[in-house]
Image: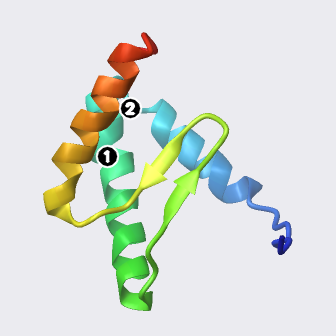
Amino acid sequence: MVKTPQHNNSKIINQLQKLMTSCENGELLNSEIITPFMTALVDICNARGYVFNIYGDHCNLIVTPGDHAEPIFNLLEAYLDEAEIH
């Protein structure tokens, strides 16, 4: 496994946390922070030819073509319902 260099990203993390904290609800968080961030991430990745699925300890990030977004969302919702995770 290749180790990635550790960077001090505390400044950007602090800025993001402040912006995210200022969002009063999930809808604002999504429209003001998450969607613009994801749009930028997808644009950069597409330009570089990256295709990825990020699997984390507490979350997953799947980037797909737009026509796959709703079916994948529905699959995840069904899984979460069945696992009683919601």
**Is residue 27 positioned above or below 17 on the image?**
above
Residue that extends furthest to the top in the rendered view of this protein:
84
The residue wearing badge 1 is 32
Residue 7 spot, x, y in % from top left: 81, 67
Residue that extends furthest to the bottom in the rendered view of this protein:
48
Mark 2–mark 1 contact, CB under 8 Å?
A: yes
> Image point 38% across, 48% down: which residue?
33
> Image point 31% across, 46% down: which residue?
32
**Is residue 22 positioned above or below 49 on the image?**
above
Residue 68 spot, x, y in % from top left: 20, 56
Other-residue count near label 1 (Cα within 10 Å), few / some / many at <14 / 14–19 / ≥20? some
**Is residue 71 positioned above or below 51 on the image?**
above
- 4 left or right of 45 in image: right
The residue wearing badge 2 is 23
Query: Residue 41 falls in which quadrant of the image?
Result: bottom left
Other-residue count near label 2 (Cα within 10 Å), few / some / many at <14 / 14–19 / ≥20? some
The kind of residue tagged 2 is Cys
Residue 14 spot, x, y in % from top left: 66, 47
- 80 left or right of 58 in image: left
